[in-house]
Amino acid sequence: MKRSSGVRLCAAATVSVLSFALVTGCSEEGSKDSGNAKGSKESNASSSDAKALNAAELEKLIIAKGEVPGFKVGPVKGGIPAKSKVKADDAKCDPLLQVLTGIAPGDPATNTSRMATEDKKDPTDDATSLDDLADGKFEDALSDSMDLDVTAVTLSSYDGDGAAKALKTVSDAVKACAGGFTGDQDGEKGKFTKVGEEKSSATGDESLAFTATNDTKDGPVPLHAEVVRHGNSIATYSTINIGAVMSKKAYTVSAPVIKAQAAKLK
């Protein structure tokens, strides 16, 4: 297989769905501050008699094409996996895998998802093929070509206080699974060596950010996520940047994506 073909396959897998299984596959083939679950309106809990938004209402509120500067927004290629197919060996860690794979936490009445991909020029469009580069330059070009944030956004709505309860399950899981855990997505095993809380965007009524470090044969792969409650709705974000991982650069959940989604939920 040509090296550039491998790059395309790895990129396609990453964009298809943000899952620990696919990230592990990419890595094997080729490649702070802390805070609590809180926001600017922590006391504004979901009302016990709140009604969930219907599917049509939710579709109007999730980010759409042209609404996130510097990003292409569209459907999640390959779709979000079924909740029943994503399980941690320890059930208390299930909420983390759900968020990382774009599944809404808890028991939402409705949910919908989008993929936001940073809009950068593909180096393979240049006259010089990656196949013709020396090994050192190839590695640099490969890293550059993959140095973009890919963020899965899931917007979900809940009856009553379901949103607050759902966010709490994620917060509890971050603490309970700090030492790492293993899981399974549709028969594909994955291992995380650690989970750590990060400083969140502090948008919405409550917010929580965390990093889960995926263990691969080529080294650790950090996956970044954030969960934000807006009343009785929740926005979850899960970001991977393969180029940053390859070059060992720090990255976070895409701030422009969170800003654009939060603006639509005000």
Image (cartoon, rainbow, N blue to C red):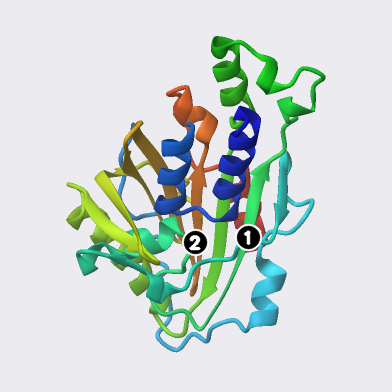
Could you say which is closer to the camera, residue 44 or residue 108?
108
> Which residue is found at the position 62% from the left and 47% from the top?
12
Q: Nearer the viewer, residue 181 or 118?
A: 181
- Residue 23 position in % (x across, y down): 45, 45
Q: Which residue is mark 1?
A: 76
Residue at far front of view: 1
Q: Secondary structure at mark 2?
A: loop
> Residue at the location (39% across, 76% down)?
84
Can you say which quadrant of the picture contains the C terminus?
A: bottom right
- Distance from disc 1 to disc 2, alpha carbons, whole Å, reads 9 Å
- How far across and how far down the image is residue 183, in percent? 29, 59
Which residue in the protein does label 2 denote? 102
Q: Which of the 4 image quadrants contains residue 150?
A: top right
- Out of 24 and 112, give the one closest to the viewer: 24
Q: 54 left or right of 66?
A: left
Label 1 packing within 10 angstroms: few (<14), some (14-19), many (20+): many
Q: Is residue 266 visible?
A: no
Looking at marks 1 and 2 on the same chain, the residue that comes earlier in the sequence is marked by 1
Evaluate whether residue 64 shows in this view: yes
Three-letter amino acid code of the residue under disc 2 = Gly
* Residue 98 shown left or right of residue 56 in the figure: left
Is mark 1 in CB contact (under 8 Å) with mark 2? yes
Disc 2 packing (10 Å; few <14; some 14–19; many ≥20): many
Query: What percent of the width, then of the height, locates residue 64?
Result: 73, 59
Q: How many marks?
A: 2
Say above or below: 62 vs 25.
Answer: below
Which residue is at a point 65% across and 30% down the rendered structure image?
4
